[in-house]
Image (tube, rainbow, N blue to C red):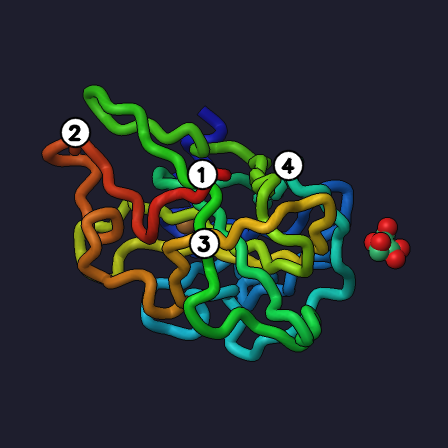
Amino acid sequence: MLATTFALLAAALGVSGHYTLPRINSGSDWQHVRRADNWQNNGFVGDVNSAQIRCFQSSPAAAPATLNVTAGSSVTYYVNPSAYHPGPMQFYLARVPDGQNINSWNGDGAVWFKVYHEQPNFGSQLTWPSNGKSSFQVPIPRCIRNGYYLIRAEHIGLHVAQSSGGAQFYISCAQIAVTGGGSTEPPNKVAFPGAYKASDPGILININYPVPTSYKNPGPPVFTC
Ligand SMILES: *[C@@H]1O[C@H](CO)[C@@H](O)[C@H](O)[C@H]1NC(C)=O
Ligand SMILES: [Cu+2]
């Protein structure tokens, strides 16, 4: 009841606040995660062709710190307050090229491979495992090469995605250093912007009517070792 009242009040006031993805593991907000443009207003990216679709930074800037991670483990990625819109959570990784510094490398080119995406449950309406959750596990594949990586975290709000540009992208990028890995070079790497089109079936979609019986996640397939 209180939540309903608040939602109605928020709608009446035109509150546009949504959510951020500011933290991994036991770090603090924006410590290992590059500070996204929505850090104060909780806004979203609507244009899949904008520079912000990569890491939600109009002016790329490093995070204060890089987290050490072992290949084959997972990183906990936090959403503040929660991923409360219906839609998929997805994670990508990009390896910093040899000879480059993670603090000045910004993920240019076809360097991003997907390590996780979720499917909804189908029924009288779609339900999303991420809906309302505040933390997610990012699998760091055990076979990838050691080195520095950016994690691109993305939650896509599909509640008004029936019109072009309606999907809401909540994004941030974290800095990690991977050890204990292997020698596999993942296939199907994509660039941001470039990976998505506004007309992709997982982006331009009416999730309410008719209720979909399948869902195609935007981007490449998920890489596993
Ligand atoms: C991360 O790993 C590097 C290389 O092994 C090490 O020098 C550094 O102290 C580690 N950082 C943290 C915060 O543990
Ligand atoms: Cu919102």
Please provide percent x and percent y for residue 219: 33, 53
Q: Residues within 10 Å of mark 1 (few under 14, many from 20)?
A: some
- The image position of residue 93, as x and y in percent, is 53, 54
- Work out how far the residue at label 1 is from the one at label 3, CA to CA, in angstroms: 25 Å
Instruction: State whether residue 33 is above or below residue 57.
Output: above
Q: In terms of sequence position, does the residue under pointer 2 or pointer 1 come before the other? A: 1
Whole-number angstrom distance, CA of label 3 to CA of label 2? 27 Å
Q: Which mark is residue 213?
A: 2
| Secondary-structure class at tag 2 | loop
Q: Which residue is identified by label 3? A: 113
At label 2, the amino acid type is Thr
- Circles 1 and 3 in contact, beta carbons < 8 Å: no
Q: Nearer the viewer, mark 2 or mark 1?
A: 2
Say if disc 1 is inside 8 Å of ligand 2.
yes
Residue type, label 1: Tyr
Kindly state the secondary structure of the residue where label 4 is placed.
loop
Q: Say whether disc 1 or disc 4 marks the residue closer to the N-terminus.
A: 4
Residue at image mark 1: 84
Of 120 and 148, nearer the camera is 148
Q: Nearer the viewer, mark 3 or mark 2?
A: 3
Q: Residue furthest front?
A: 183
For disc 2, the neighbor class at 10 Å (few under 14, some 14 to 19, many from 20) is few
Q: Work out how far the residue at label 4 is from the one at label 3, CA to CA, in angstroms.
A: 16 Å
Would you call the spot at circle 3 few (<14 residues within 10 Å), some (14-19), or many (20 or more)?
many
Residue 166 place in picture, x, y as percent? 26, 57
What mark, if any, has residue 72 been given in the picture? 4
Q: Mark 1 against mark 3, which lies toward the viewer?
A: 3
